[in-house]
Image (cartoon, rainbow, N blue to C red):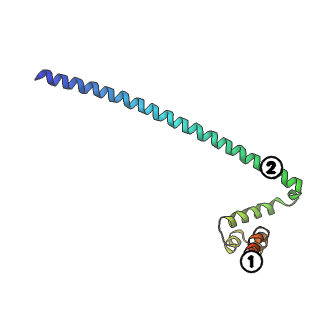
Amino acid sequence: MGWVIAILFGSAVVLLILSFLKTAQSKSNIEQQIDQVTFTLKNEIHELQQQIRNIELDAEITAKQSGAMSGPSEERILLREVLDMHKRGYSNESIALKKQLTPNEVDLMLLPYSANKGERSMVAQ
């Protein structure tokens, strides 16, 4: 009976050691996978940043060639913010409140960017 207990105890110790080794191996595999995903994401982020820089440079070149850069930058920033809010679904009244403008001023600023939509819907009816 004592031998059986000793054998069972010995096999339990061996199995415990094996489980620790397997756990360490699985942790290293998981860490390798996490590292691979991290490197992939970093590469994709770098590529996206490069594309954004290229787009910004192209936009600046186009603006300079067309003469659009001659206007004051404060007006361009305001127009950019108003367009951004409009595209995110803000109403013209809420844009006017947030930017401290009149609703008529917001309508006039957005008119060149929304006129095509209105004309198309009028023709379709």
Q: Residue at x 68, y 75 (%)?
A: 93
Marker disc for residue 58: 2
Q: Residue at x 53, y 35 (%)?
A: 35
Q: Is residue 4 left or right of residue 96?
A: left
Horizontal and vertical percent position of residue 25: 41, 29
Label 1 crowd (10 A; few <14 / some 14-19 / many >=20): few
Where's residue 4, x and y in %?
14, 23
Residue found 28% across the figure and 27% down from its top: 15
60 relative to 91, above or below: above
Residue 58 position (above or below residue 100): above
x and y percentages locating residue 100 in the rendered image: 72, 71
Q: Earlier in the sequence, mark 2 or mark 1?
A: 2
For the point 71% across and 68% down, the residue is 99
Pointer 2 with pointer 1, Cβ within 8 A: no
Please name the amino acid that badge 2 sits on: Asp
Quick one: which residue is furthest to the top in this view?
3
| Amino acid bearing label 1 | Met
Q: CA distance from mark 2 to mark 1?
A: 35 Å
Q: Which mark is residue 122?
A: 1
